[in-house]
Every structure is written in C-alpha cells, then in structure tokens.
Image: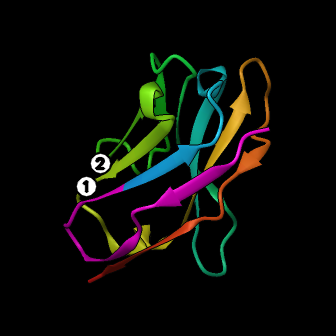
Amino acid sequence: QVQLVESGGGLVQAGDSLRLSCAASRRTFSRYDMGWFRQAPGKEREFVGGISWSGGSTYYADSVKGRFTISRDSAKNTVYLQMTSLKPEDTAVYYCAARERGYASYDYWGQGTQVTVSS
C-alpha cells in the first residue's frame, strides 16, 4: 500500500503558474504509475495527466496539454504537476493517485489540494 500527500495548492490569478507536489510513502515508488486528477465544484472528477513508473511516458488531457507538465523524482518519492497559464476553469481540488505497474485502475489516492484561479 502507498500513502500520498499533495501540497502546493493555493489562490493565484489567471495566467499565473503553480507547482503541485505529491509525496509517496513507499520506497517502491518506482513500481507505480502516477496520475493527477481534479474535481471542480458540482462536477465529476476528471483525469488531468499521468506519468509512467519509469518517467519515460507522460500523457495529458486535452484541456491542459501544453500548459501542464508532470514529472517525477524517484530519489524523493515525489511526483510534480507544473501548471502554467492557469485559467479560472482550472479551479478544482487536485488529487494525485497511484496505480501499480501493470494494473488498470488507480487504487491509491491523496487527500487533495485546492487550486483556485481568480480572473
């Protein structure tokens, strides 16, 4: 089992940048693909992007492609979500999640961190 703790959320203005971090508890961090999701008020949770266990592959939702970048630091057991050119519609609670290599579903979730983008 892996525990995830997000940090870095806050209130920013449109056009600003923000970096979220997600620290994982296990030293077997490299066994997990990592994903970022978000949930805006009154909406369903949506996929933002993900990174493979090796860090060699990243993938993004169309809504954030070109603005958000996911990376991971295995030495720190941490995955990052760098967000640039933020828009008010990016306002949401952001969650990181982990899925064990070879599995289809994300089974481990953090508690979430709030990102609010003012216009």
Residue at 76% of width from left, 17% of height from top?
Answer: 102
Q: Amino acid at mark 2?
A: Arg
Query: Which tag, 1 or 2, sits closer to the chain's start?
Result: 2
Q: Secondary structure at mark 2?
A: loop
**Horizontal arrangement in the rendering, residue 79 relative to residue 84 (left or right):** right
Q: Are marks 1 and 2 in contact (CB under 8 Å)?
A: yes
Residue at label 2?
67
Q: Residues within 10 Å of mark 1 (few under 14, many from 20)?
A: some
Where the N terminus falls, by quadrant?
Answer: top right
Q: Residues within 10 Å of mark 2 (few under 14, many from 20)?
A: some
Magenta stretch bounds: 1-19
Reply yes or no: does residue 113 show up in magenta: no
Q: Amino acid at mark 1?
A: Thr
Q: How far across and down, in percent of the image, does residue 49 sit?
A: 51, 41
Q: Secondary structure at mark 1?
A: loop
Q: CA distance from mark 1 to mark 2?
A: 5 Å
Q: How far across and down, in percent of the image, does residue 116 sit?
A: 40, 78
Residue at 43% of width from left, 26% of height from top?
Answer: 75
**Horizontal arrangement in the rendering, residue 13 relative to residue 65 (left or right):** left
**Horizontal arrangement in the rendering, residue 1 relative to residue 51 (left or right):** right
Q: How far across and down, in percent of the image, does residue 17 sit?
A: 23, 60
Residue 107 position (above or below residue 86):
above
Residue at 48% of width from left, 31% of height from top?
Answer: 59
Q: Nearer the viewer, residue 17 or 30?
A: 30
Residue at label 1?
84
Q: How far across and down, in percent of the image, does residue 23 sit?
A: 53, 46
